[in-house]
Amino acid sequence: MKRIFNYASLLAAAVMLVSCSGNIDPEQENNDPDNPNTENTDPTPSGPKVLKVSSDRNLIQTFDGDYATLTVTLGDEVLTEGVEFYDGDNNPIAIPGYKFATEVPGEHQIWASYGTYMSETIIIKAINTKIPVTPEDPQPSSTDFKVRALVTEFTTTGCSWCPSMKTVLHGVLENENTADMVVMTACHSSLVNSKKDPAYIKTGYEDFSGMTGMPYVFCDMYYGFGYYTTLTSSDVTEVFGELCAAKEGKAAGLAVTSSMKDGQLVIKATVKAAETGNYRIGAFLLEDGIYGQQTSATEDWMHNHDDVIRYIDSQYYTNSGKEQFYGHSVGNVDEGKTADYVFVWDLEKIWDAGALAGEQYGGCAWNPFVEENLHIAVFASTVGVDEKGNQYYYVSNVVDCPIGSDVPYEYSK
């Protein structure tokens, strides 16, 4: 993916575009403790051999004979015998045929030993709820996907400059064609003028984005811009258009399905690669219809906040302790092939934790959620190369999925 922005014209329009948090940390790969499928992308490993255990799935059902298939490698060699498995308490466990199954719900820690070698621990989640089935692919032989950009508006109800950005974005989204280019999210993660914000969320996402002040718009987890007095809806429309144009023919496809039972939300996301590469999948839980008095509002609609981020499930840490938000690794995916990631969210726990943090840090507890006001932004990220040969992560594609609904792959034609 190349950066194709016309910087001269955008700067003339007083839009400042910056590259934020995009460069790959050399320690970032193979360090996702939430996902057993993370692979070392270095094609020429050096040093002593390492024992690794991986799983083809991060989530299984506790019924219907469901299981996850484990693979154990020592360097480049796949081991099929002589391996012993242990749980998180270092107790030996039997995994016949390297197929892990359980009737006990929860997170199961597994590690392996082979002679004097020991692997790192992986986690496989087991649930009592049926895992949703990926929607049928309407064009199995195609990888020409509909392209969208993930856009986050950093804002808060106490921000007196934010209505100016809201006005610009509102003008952009009034055009249906432009609105279809993006999945909008709003992160109320800061407080200004000590005003209570019912949409407040405590997160490290703003630090990751490179935000230094509000309002601020973060696009595809790579580009950002703030507000200046000459910024227009046409300027932002141009930015969104160029973001999507840069990904045409390269963007991955996403198929998402979700189910809700007893307050537990299960989301299965499947990425289909248009280009061979390493992919990550993440998701935001969004809520519409949150009322909060907006400082310096010029119109009544500014007091009603939609697409508000209530929960982020895409974080992981590098060896150096840096918090990243590009998603959970699903490893290398060949062109035209797919990989899955399954999210399991307990909405009551999410709300209890969010409401407590909102009250403690934002001065205002969350209202109870309204299920029909909830939806999910699911994204896939991958590695791009800029015009100077530098590698960076960016959001390859994103979709918006209602609770309890399906979103099949969307093709451009």
Image (cartoon, rainbow, N blue to C red):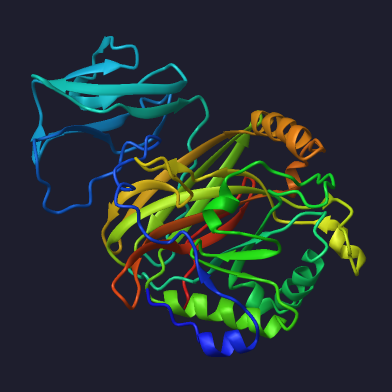
Q: Indicate left or right for 36 with 306 as reference.
A: left
Residue 83 visible at all: no
Residue 80 locus on image (x, y percent): 10, 29
Total labels drawn: 0
76 relative position to 159: left or right: left
Q: From the viewer's perspective, is residue 402 above or below residue 70?
A: below
Residue located 61% across and 43% down the image: 203
The residue positioned 52% from the left and 53% from the top of the image is: 208
Residue occupying image coordinates x 76% and y 54%: 156
Q: Position of residue 180 (x, y in %)?
A: 62, 72
Residue 58 seen by the camera: yes
Q: Is residue 224 above or below residue 315?
A: below
In terms of depth relative to the viewer, which is nearer, 149 or 158?
A: 158
Looking at the image, the residue that sits furthest to the top is 91
Percent position of residue 53, x then y? 22, 31
Would you place residue 358 above or below residue 145 in this image? above
Q: Please state if 224 lies on the left or on the right of 281 as rendered.
A: right
In which quadrant is the N terminus drawn? bottom left
Q: Judge from the rendering whether residue 124 lies leftward or rightward of residue 192; answer left or right.
A: left
Residue 145 sits in quarter: bottom left
Percent position (x, y) of residue 272?
37, 59
The residue that appears at 52% across and 71% down in the rendered structure is: 18
